[in-house]
Image (tube, rainbow, N blue to C red):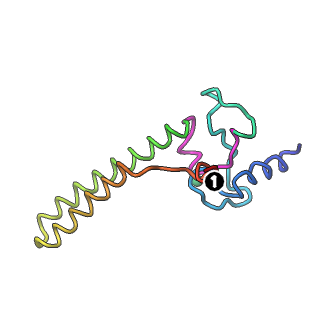
């Protein structure tokens, strides 16, 4: 099989979407990803090969899907937590009602990121 045919074959696995974020992929704008990295014993069999956008693949590197899930959650959690602290600081300068409203949204966002299930596109299409 030629490389282009092999890439088309891999792209068809998800109907042309990134296996992680689900973004529609452009012709050359994606990588062939081993869902379970070879470093962790992943094979090059069809069931372990999916297309990934460059952004997701760059984040994933040698992580398993569960490690990526953990990384995405905690990376976002820490950024939001820092942002929430800034919002709470700003609340000192706002009127009481606005401050209460804004603080609640900031805390809700942190709570959602901490607890919401993270499901990758390839898991949604397999379900
Ligand atoms: Zn992606």
The part of the chain drawn in magenta is: 48-63
Which residue is farthest right? 1
Q: Quadrant of residue 44?
A: top right
Instruction: Residue 105: give x, y in percent of width and height.
Output: 26, 64
Q: Quadrant of residue 49?
A: top right
The residue carrying mark 1 has its beta carbon less than 8 Å from ligand 1: no
- Tell me: residue 32, above or below residue 26: above
Instruction: Residue 67: give x, y in percent of width and height.
Output: 49, 37
Relative horizontal placement of residue 7, taking residue 101 as reference (left or right)? right
Q: Is residue 54 magenta?
A: yes
What residue is pinned by disc 1?
Answer: 125
Residue in the image at 66% along x and 38% along y: 34
Q: Secondary structure at mark 1?
A: helix
Instruction: Residue 100: give x, y in percent of width and height.
Output: 16, 66
Quarter of the image with the N terminus is top right
Relative horizontal placement of residue 70, taking residue 104 as reference (left or right)? right
Residue in the image at 63% along x and 53% along y: 125
Q: Is residue 72 magenta?
A: no
Q: Nearer the viewer, residue 103 or 62?
A: 103
Which residue is farthest front? 127
Relative horizontal placement of residue 28, taking residue 91 as reference (left or right)? right
Instruction: Residue 54: give x, y in percent of width and height.
Output: 61, 51
Q: Residues within 10 Å of mark 1 (few under 14, many from 20)?
A: few
Q: Quadrant of residue 43?
A: top right
């Amino acid at each position: 099989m030629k490389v282009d045919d092999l890439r088309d074959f891999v792209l068809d696995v998800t109907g042309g979407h990134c296996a992680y974020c689900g973004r529609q992929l452009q012709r050359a704008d994606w990588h062939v990803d081993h869902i379970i990295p070879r470093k962790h014993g992943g094979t090059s069999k069809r069931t372990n090969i999916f297309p990934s956008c460059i952004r997701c693949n760059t984040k994933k590197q040698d992580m398993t899907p569960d490690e990526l899930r953990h990384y995405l959650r905690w990376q976002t959690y820490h950024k939001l937590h820092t942002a929430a602290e800034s919002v709470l600081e700003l609340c000192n300068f706002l009127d009481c009602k606005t401050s209460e409203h804004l603080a609640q949204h900031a805390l809700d966002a942190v709570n959602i990121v901490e607890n919401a299930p993270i499901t990758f596109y390839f898991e949604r299409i397999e379900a």
